Amino acid sequence: MKPAISVILLTTLVGAGQGLFLAFYSAEWFVLLGILRPALNDYGGQAAALSFLFLALGLVASFFHLGHPERAWRAAAMWRSSWLSREVIALPAAMLLILGYALVKLSALDSIVLVLGESIPISISTVVGFGAVLAICALFVCTAMIYACLKFLRQWHSPLTVLNFLLMGCASGFTLASALASYSQDGRFAYFVGMAVFLTLAALVFRFATLLRNKGLRSPSSLQSAIGVHHPTIRQIAQGAMGGSFNTRAFIHGYGASVVRLARRGFLLLGFVIPLLLLQISDESSILICSLAFVLQYLGLLAERWYFFIEAEHPQNLYYQMIS
Amino acid sequence: MTQLALVIDLNTCVGCHACVTSCKEWNTSGQAGPMVDQNPYAAEPTGTFFNRVQSFEVGTFPNTQTVHFPKSCLHCEDPPCVPVCPTGASYKRPEDGIVLVDYDKCIGCEYCSWACPYGAREIDEQQKVMKKCTLCIDRLYDESLPEAERKPVCVLSCPTSARIYGDIHDPESDASKAISDAGGYQLMPEWGTAPANHYLPRRKVGIAVHAEDLQRVDNPLRKEDRGPRKPTTRTTLDDSTSW
């Protein structure tokens, strides 16, 4: 598949934004449960606003993928059958709830509405945030299932795709949360950085497992089954178009093996290994190192998503032997 | 249930592209609106087509055959492109099984083209909507056309009758008979899409011609001196009965 830049931006931005919200909201629960100490200065509202910004940027990026962005509202219609349609519903829902959480947190509206089990006070923001978490989980699944549900794109058609989207989104979000914690000095740095290291490591393990799985994949289709002529030697002599067609432009990436290898090594280093090292050497006061870790990880995840497209082999390319 | 489809005979297709040009001509000037042509007279001409003919050389020289392979939407019975469409612009007509795109609803997200293993769908670079073969639905039900012309234009234009149109669910249709008589097959059956369009395989066409068929030889009976019996003078059965 040819990488679609707007989709790469959409999935990575939305992933990081969701991870960031989960980082701060989970910290809030750990405080409520008495596992973490309360934040010295609560940046939860600002973090949620930043998370909203990431999702909004992703939404804007997605519009550049459409031929008719003015009709985008129609895309919510087929939620019964289409994962893309479900994403179109889940994304604004998550944005709305995250924005609601941020507004409640940043305004003076937040107040305790009930007390769970005598000791856990639940405020309005906690309730709204819980809704946001549900929407975020739905969004992670919808975004990944758009790719994972296409059964003949064998490199994508796996539960690993969903797991990878979830882990990589959360990893980049927690890395960003570490940077914010070192900036705001809210006393939660250890939690965020610990989780960021754990999630980045887990994401690396499963992404590597996916690479291994995809290496051994063999398509059940061949040129023989594509045209129904069962002879071992078939050579294409005309592809039905002189100057290429949509089929050659949209599905055949045309990058050489060395570029693809470079991208694979690059995303493994930038997206996972280097951020892990940077997070390991960072401490509560190293804003620069944590910020660098996030920027590099985000660039690495962009490369990862680019490679994700390159990796997928569309069976229609069998009809275009002369270039693929 | 009706499932209209094409049956394409690879044994008789000569790769003349008459189906390609007539398809483009009919559909670019029809209800579907223009199908874009980019650089039509320059070095790299490209554009939107519903139908293309590809050519393959099978075998190793000198024992080769050229297979011309017309390729268009196969109107799958279980089309993977339809459920993924977020707007419902892609749909399969229940009454005749034709898979269509509503150009007014299509947002041009290209997701359906990812979901089609055959690469049958093409985005129109000018109108920015997904396009594909409509089986000339604007001909099939047009009562102003003579009945013999209510067929896809590619079928009418094919000089070798390599394209057969009909309802493949009706065992008496020409299409169904062609499939069962000549071993019609589906493309990439491994994906379970059940394409409605079928292809007829290359097959050996010919009769055995022996030397005796070309040059008359002596009657073998005469050679053995066992010629026809001489007329007899006795009364035969023909003389005594009147039938």
Image (cartoon, coloured by chain):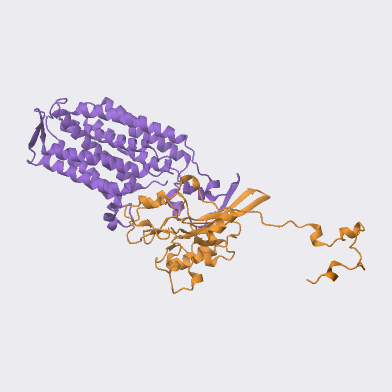
**In the image, residue B41 above or below residue A137:** below
Where's residue A12, x and y in %? 30, 41
The answer to which quarter of the image holds residue A68 is bottom left
Residue drawn at 36 percent across, 38 percent down? A161
Question: Of residues A131 and A272, which is closer to you in this image?
Answer: A131
Would you say residue A324 is visible in this rendering? Answer: no
Residue drawn at 32 percent across, 28 percent down? A201
Q: Which chain is orange?
A: B
Would you say residue A160 is visible in this rendering? Answer: yes
Question: Of residues B209 and A287, which is closer to you in this image?
Answer: B209
Q: Is residue A267 left or right of residue B201?
A: left
Where's residue A40, x and y in %? 11, 29
Where's residue A61, x and y in %? 29, 49
Question: Of residues A166 and B146, which is closer to you in this image?
Answer: B146
Q: Is residue B150 left or right of residue A42?
A: right
**In the image, residue B75 above or below residue A199:** below
Residue drawn at 30 percent across, 34 percent down? A167
Q: Is residue B109 left or right of residue B142?
A: left
Q: Which chain is purple?
A: A
